[in-house]
Image (cartoon, grey):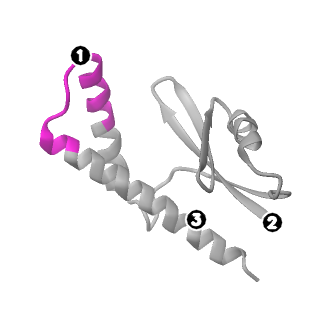
Amino acid sequence: MTTKVALFEDVGEIGPTYRAVAGGNQTMGRTAGEALDALTPRLGAESSHTLIIVRNLRPDQFFTAEQQRRLEELMAKWRQARDAGVGLSPEEQAELEGLVDAELRASAERAAAISRDLVP
């Protein structure tokens, strides 16, 4: 069985963070290797072959530049609010959650498209 692993880079306030995802497993690391090393023990013995996908977080047909810009903006506001011990307005919180859901759906659609491209 081949396991497909996706790596995503998030350049945040403290520097890049990598997330490795395989099925229902997900790990984080300061480097791609660290994220993969943390994920490996979670993969079953049946995962004898692993495919790794590394993607730049650029806008695409699944998640646009405007969506990325707004998500970054709301995440910055959320961090400031969290640090101040308050929350976002209900409207902003709903928008943030909607964008997070949209990015998650985009990741799934992107992975499905990559998977289709791999089939000969």
Tag 1: Cα neighbours inside 10 Å, few (<14), some, or many (≥20)?
few
Question: Is tag 2's residue or tag 3's residue first in the polypeptide sequence?
Answer: 2
Q: Residue at x 43, y 62 (%)?
A: 105
Q: Circle 3 — which element?
A: helix
Q: Which residue is mark 2?
A: 1
Residue 16 relative to residue 100: left or right: right
Q: Is residue 84 magenta?
A: yes
Question: Is tag 2's residue or tag 1's residue first in the polypeptide sequence?
Answer: 2
Span colored in magenta: 75-93
Q: Nearer the viewer, mark 2 or mark 3?
A: 2
Pick the front one: 112 or 72: 112
User: Residue 31: percent from the left, percent from the top?
Assistant: 68, 33
Pick the front one: 84 or 63: 84
Q: Which residue is mark 3?
A: 111
- CA separation, marks 2 and 3? 18 Å
Q: Residue at x 18, y 42 (%)?
A: 92
- CA separation, marks 2 and 1? 48 Å
Q: Is residue 92 magenta?
A: yes
